[in-house]
Amino acid sequence: MSRLSVLAGPGLNEGMEHLGEHRARLGELPRDGAGVIDVLERSGLRGRGGAGFPAGTKWRTVAGNARGNAVVLVNGAEGEPLSRKDRVLMETRPHLVLDGAALAADAVGAREVILYVGADHTRARDALQRALAERPADEWKRTTVVSAPVRYVSGEESAAVHFVNDGVALPTAVPPRPFERGVDGRPTLVQNVETLAHAALIARLGDGWFRDLGRGESGGTALLTVTGAVPHAGVVEVAQGSSVGDAVSAAGGLSSRSSAVLLGGYFGGWVTADEAWGLSVDTMELRSRGHALGCGVVAVLPEHRCGVVETARIVAYLAGQSARQCGPCVFGLRAIAEAMGRIATGGAVGDDLDRIRRWSGELAGRGACRHPDGAAAFVASALRVFGDEMVLHARRGACSGGAAARAAVAA
């Protein structure tokens, strides 16, 4: 990995990199204003929050709407239970995140920057506040730190704007989208912290440098949280275009045999282990094959643990974390979770499995936000990967993994 990648610098166990160290290592941040948008577009940088939208296009759109009155909302909510990448970045490289925020503010014409950080990410919030205190007054005077509620949906961009405006971290109907009318009705750039960190490096080193970091057609690197059946669970940085197997190797390889991998977190999906190892860590490549990199989670399921039980646990969590603003979440997702729970514990009733198949197919696209869509895609992946095991659970009340299969994936 390049010595100038996102997590390059002091060891991650050494705490935050202070401003003097940061500038000695990387130099001053170029302040080219709107010119950086051209560089971002050429680099091909895509958002690292889950959607994978081109960053340069997003910045240009906000700048075009702003007329010097935009807001930059730095999204560090990280509500995905399995993900650690954003908080590790904020804890250890806060100045790189703040550089990206300052760069974005200059580029889109923003007079206000909001750091939206998960309320339970106390070390990340403390590091950002200490880093702000080390920076020039004109930066920290326009910057506010806001604690995002500990809910799965809090990091969705319209939910983040809704919380800043009204104290309610629930998604809102779109349009208008935040880039059109967001915080206080102003055009708002909502950008994940990892995306901003990459932008700060691209501004210094150029779009060609970023593209050369990747493999094949992919550019740059990706931060991934690798967990489960690996000896060194945690955050790794790999070149875009590397394989999932490469990411697992970076976490020490397998600590036990694996049957499946949860790729992309709870809004991602299950993939068989045999297929997963060769998949590319690239948003668009994965999407073309029906998978998702999502928030960059690679959770390796040990072979002795039951994928049906794990799926039931996650669906129950997603049902409990829904916005509860429409029928698909309040009734549809809850019904799927209840049926999955019965199947997982060997207490299936009637045609529970057929109902799950039907309901999950009907759920997508019908909600007020994308929460039910993500849950439906996750359930569909479980039906593909653990279909035979679900039939065994539903028809015989049995689990091929035995009692030990009730254990949860290591988080």
Image: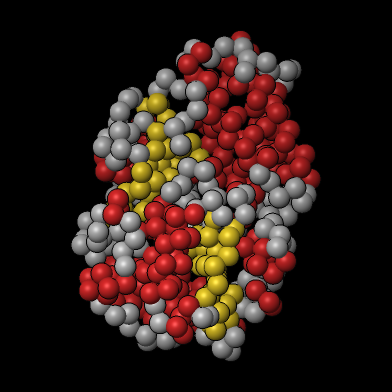
- Looking at the picture, tell me which residue is in the foreground, 294 or 128: 128
Q: Is residue 364 left or right of residue 92?
A: right
Q: How many callouts does the rendering have?
A: 0
Is 81 left, or right, of 184 in this rendering? Answer: left
Residue at (27%, 35%) from the top-left corner?
253
Q: Residue 305, image x and y in percent?
A: 46, 22
Residue 290 visible in the current orientation: no
Q: How is the image coloured?
A: secondary structure
The residue positioned 64% from the left and 21% from the top of the image is: 343
- Residue 292 visible in the shown view: yes
Measuring 28% from the left and 70% from the top, which residue is drawn there? 22
Q: Position of residue 358 (x, y in %)?
A: 69, 33
Q: Nearer the viewer, residue 138 or 292?
A: 138
Residue for point 21% across, 61% down: 2
Quadrant in the picture for residue 246:
top left
Residue 32: x %, y % from top left: 37, 86
Q: What is the x, y in percent for residue 183?
A: 65, 74
Q: Quadrant of the N terminus?
A: bottom left
Q: Nearer the viewer, residue 174 or 366?
A: 174
Asked if residue 361 is positioned above or below residue 189 in the image, the reply reads: above
- Which residue is nearer to you in this view: 194 or 382? 194
Displayed quadrant of residue 147 = bottom right
